[in-house]
Amino acid sequence: MPQSVSGIRSSGRDIIPVGYILIAVIAAAFGGASGIRMAAGYSEASDAVHGLVMTGFVVLPALFGGFGGLFLPRSLSRHLPVRMPCAPLNAAGWVCFLLSAVLFEFFPQFPLSAALSWCGGALAMAMVIMIAILDSRAGSREGVRPLDFFAWSQLFAGFALLLTLPVAAARLVRFALAGPVTGAAVQDIMASLVIPMTPALLMAAFGIAALAMERVSGPRIAVGRWMALCAGVALLVSVLPWMRVFTRSGEGFSEQTILMTGHAGAAISVITGLVFACFWGRELWRGKLSLRPSVLWSFGLLMTVAAGGLMVVLGSGSLHGAVMSGLLFALFAGLYLRSEEMGWPNPSRVMVGGHFALVAAGTLSCAMGGVFLPVGAVLFLLSVPAAVGVLLSIRYQMRFSAPVHVGGRVSG
């Protein structure tokens, strides 16, 4: 079994990261169906519950446990990719996520167990990510690549999770010891986690976008360090005040203070994304970037966040809604990037463009609100068969195209 530079044993397979992505895909199907029912007026689920499902069971496991586990090994080493360490801990985190999803969806009478299981899974996932990054810096510097923005974003986000999740879990246990815990109380505590987690998720999404573009144009270490500095500031602004307010004695705490700090951190993240978009837009204009599917979806992420920030400045939009919509583009950017790394054939441009156009139009319709919400729900529903069509086109080309050699492997 391969070992890292400091001797920590690691797994030689990508089964667990793929398992995290599988949980995210299944949760996205349930959450998307719930969102469509809400838009049509057939569901009484609250926006907070829907946002909690999409953030906690779709975005978080996909960006960190999934894409973090798949992309970090190659990002950390100049030579052969390192392997993610602590496979048993990573597997335990995946099991906790799966258990929490099952309890949340099918056994709502156990809200405390679902919440604590989710906190345990997220903590295990964050620890594995941080161990992998920090362990790659140990021992000899030979073959060690300077941390790019993707690695920095994963490191900072993992640190933010390690700061916030134990605080939320401790508050849940405190309520349990004081008496019976209601589902509404658990939902309030878990929903408050979305505020400090939003900048972390957004920076991780920017990390995937940077990775997609750097795989085409080459690494930009200096740019990554400046963006990493912005990421650290955004997380400090949002996480530390949240912890200070959330751990006060007494039952009440200032929701306005938490919202202000969370919005400040998200605003810094949006400004970082704007600078990022300008830099890579210049690279695309100069012809240093080819518009691969992963790059297209990465620009979709940047443009969505930029447009959402502009709408907030004009007083006609929600920053949280823009961030959540942008994270959807990041998930598809990561999936397309993984297919490119595996050497799979490029999908049909028509299918990719149609899929992208449907998601973009659905995002715009939902952002406009009002009578456009059902239109956005229909567009998102149509994007599902479009995504299936993209997968079928890849499969068709893999079946009839010549093998592609990638890193000593034969694909196709």
Image (cartoon, rainbow, N blue to C red):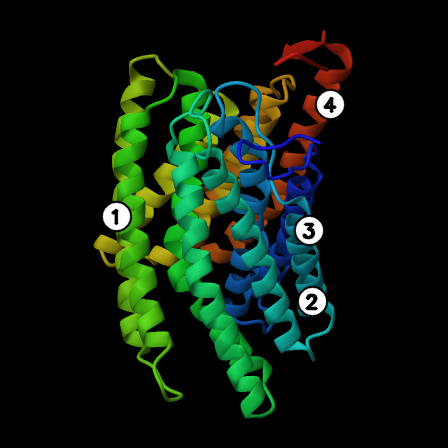
Q: Left or right of 230: which side holds 68?
A: right
Query: Disc 4 or 1, which lies upstream in sequence?
Result: 1
What residue would you read off at disc 3?
A: 26
Query: Disc 4 or 2, which lies upstream in sequence?
Result: 2
Residue 280 found in image quarter: top left
Residue furthest top in the image: 402
> What is the crowding at mark 3: few (fewer than 14 residues within 10 Å), some, or many (at least 20)?
some
Q: Which mark is nearer the camera, 3 or 1? A: 3
Mark 2–mark 3 CB contact (< 8 Å): no
Amino acid carrying label 1: it is: Leu
Mark 3–mark 1 CB contact (< 8 Å): no
Q: Position of residue 262 (x, y in %)?
A: 32, 62
What residue would you read off at disc 2?
A: 105
Q: Position of residue 91 (x, y in %)?
A: 69, 50
In the depicted view, which residue is nearer to us: 329 or 356? 329
Query: Disc 1 or 2, which lies upstream in sequence?
Result: 2
Q: Can residue 201 be seen in the rendering of this structure?
A: yes
Q: How far apart are marks 3 and 1 (CA)?
A: 32 Å
Query: Disc 2 or 3, which lies upstream in sequence?
Result: 3
Q: Quadrant of the C terminus?
A: top right
Residue furthest right in the image: 399
**Which element carries disc 1, helix, strand or loop?**
helix
**Which element carries disc 4, helix, strand or loop?**
helix
Q: Left or right of 205: which side holds 350?
A: right
Amino acid carrying label 2: it is: Glu
What residue would you read off at disc 1?
A: 310
Q: Which mark is residue 395?
A: 4
Residue at coordinates 47% horizontally, 32% vertically from top-left?
A: 297
Q: Which mark is nearer the camera, 4 or 2? A: 2
Mark 1–mark 2 CB contact (< 8 Å): no
Q: Distance between the residues labelled 3 and 4?
A: 21 Å
